[in-house]
Amino acid sequence: MNIFPEGSLSVSLITTVWAGLFVICFFNLRLGWTISGLIVPGYLAPLLILKPWSAVAVIIEAVFTYLAVIGFSRFGEKTGLYSEVFGRDRFFFILLLSVAMRLLFDDAVFPWFTSILSQHLEIEFLYRDGLYSIGLVIVALTANQFWTSGLRRGLFQLAVTLTITFLIIKYILIGYTNFRLNELANVYENLATSILASPKAYIILLTTAFIASRMNLLYGWEFSGIAIPALLALLWYKPQEILISVAEAVIIYFIASLLLRTKFFSKMSIEGARKILFFFNIAFFYKLVLGFILPLFLTNIAPNDYYGFGYMLTSLIAIKMHDKGFGARIIGSTVITSAISIAAATLIGFSLTFLSKNEIPQPSPHPQKTIEMKTQKAWSNIPIRYSTGKPLPLLSSPFEKIEIKSNNRKLGIDELRFIDETIFVPLFKLSETSDKNLSTIELIMNKAAKAADYPGIKIMLFGNKAFSPDFIELKSSLESGSAASFYLRFNEGSNILLESDCHSIKSLCLMRLIESEFKPKVILLNGLFSRGDEGTIETETAKTYVKSSLFDLFNQISMREMDKLKDNLNIILVKTAPKKNNLNKNFVYVSSNTGAYSPDTLNEVQQKLINLLVNKSYSVKFVNGLPETSGLETDNLLSSRYLPMTKNTSMIVLWVSE
């Protein structure tokens, strides 16, 4: 049933929060369970489908946050050094310690734990794609939920509400409506994904929460919780969103006031959980109508851009306006507090910049050594041999080869930056100039020659000086923990980044077809090719992924540099689906960063790609959020993390099964 507007509530966390709120209110009204943590079940339930280990990480950090707060409070009570924290001060303290716990666990405990599993139990665990928490305030809200009922009862209540919400989402919303979880970027905001990637947001959040707590204590200002002005303060860099959020809160308030005066509602007791559910249902219906109406008149806008910020922020402001009977004062105090706080937070953030020098570290000096620069004829159409014995040409054109090897260790950030500035950036610039002979490339490599004796890096150049290459290849060794190959096209090519894994013959056949048709500027292979017998090259694939790998560097730099070349960058990924999905081997499954569900919703390049597959007798299906395609959304992939940093980039993924 198409009951949710496409591109908004059909792929939004607001819908799952709505389902979770019904569950929480039901148990509060029937069994008297706590009503705090209103968004927790609806926020965590999709994680159980898409990123289950992230949901586990959130709960672990929330438990330790609760234990830290209660331990601190009891210590002060027993020693008499300070009184027990309560009310808004307690929530601020929970928020503060939740940030500390995220820093401790996400940056230290979880990486250490996963390395133990890998080294001693031989359990491969992709840390950066698994065990880390998500959300700006979700850890604090979960810990606060434990405070009222205690840890044991709180964990039991959370397990029950989370399980029921999970079942509603998976078997009702996904099973019988057009709701889907394809677009995780629209579900879990990029701002909330990584604590290390959002220091500015946390400075604003904590500063505003502290000031709001003081304003309430000194002047009696009401906010419906100090988290409201704290979240509103995040919008001051986009002031139009503040106007949209305030306008939505006012609309909800007036609609609720009119409905409560009708005969049907005037005889009911609308308090507590009922009031929260009543106001949020109005907010949800308002977004539902807006999502259907706006595209009819404004075809080039996204309805999400005209929704109020957050999931329940506008509803809670409207409730406080209704309770106090004077909306202007509530809005004024909330906006003023957030404005004062953003000024203070900006000053704090600016002051912190003086604590560190913003300089790129340079490699340590090493003794000068002569590097032998060997030349040989370029490879051309070398086949790849698998166990099937079926040969496959790697590229349609010959290429030159530069090999970067790591001596069995992970490269540091200074080494990666050095490789970036001395090799990648000059090569990209050279690829756009008319002077593309090998002697110029050798000059670039000679500039980076000292990296040959730099710890962990070895550079070799192969080529014919009389040959102007179509491709340059850079390859990282398997010993570094990240096997990868990078190809940069020097002749004219389309502004397309083609990425493929080396896990199956199907993925490489598909990559070869796309390369010959589209002539992409850059090709990335997540795997290694080495020369074998009888003129063939064999493949190897890294078992683990490390954050500072050369493949990650290839990926980021390619997107950054290609984004500078032309206005539109298209990323095409060819991936082998996990065996757990049990996909039909006769189909190629398609997902995109826009959540497209048919060829008509793709851009011109992507439509041409689908037509190519169909013409070559491939059967195509779109990832639609069903259980068998769970985890095949674009936001689970490395490249999607860098999309917000580009101007106008589209990404499409082709999934094949072995």
Image (tube, helix red, strand yellow):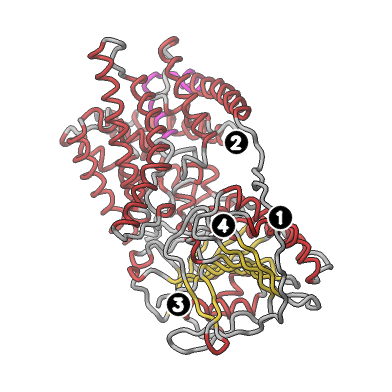
Instruction: Rate crowding at label 1 as few (under 14), some (14 to 19) or many (20 or more) other CA atoms within 10 Å.
Output: few
Mark 2 or mark 3, which is nearer the start of the sequence? Answer: 2
Q: Residue 35 has which mark?
A: none
Q: Position of residue 476 (x, y in %)?
A: 56, 65
Mark 4 or mark 1, which is nearer the start of the sequence? Answer: 1
For label 3, the residue is 504
Classify mark 4: helix, strand or loop: loop
Mark 1 or mark 2, which is nearer the start of the sequence? Answer: 2
Apparent side of residue 51 relative to residue 506 in the rendered image (left or right): left
Q: Amino acid at mark 1?
A: Gln
Q: Residue at x 45, y 38 (%)?
A: 310
284 within the magenta span: no
Mark 4 or mark 2, which is nearer the start of the sequence? Answer: 2
For label 2, the residue is 238
Mark 3 or mark 4, which is nearer the start of the sequence? Answer: 4
Q: Amino acid at mark 2?
A: Lys
Q: Closest to the observer: 109 or 147?
A: 109
For label 1, the residue is 368
Q: Closest to the observer: 530 or 511?
A: 530
Apparent side of residue 552 relative to residue 130 in the rendered image (left or right): right
Classify mark 2: helix, strand or loop: loop
For label 4, the residue is 456
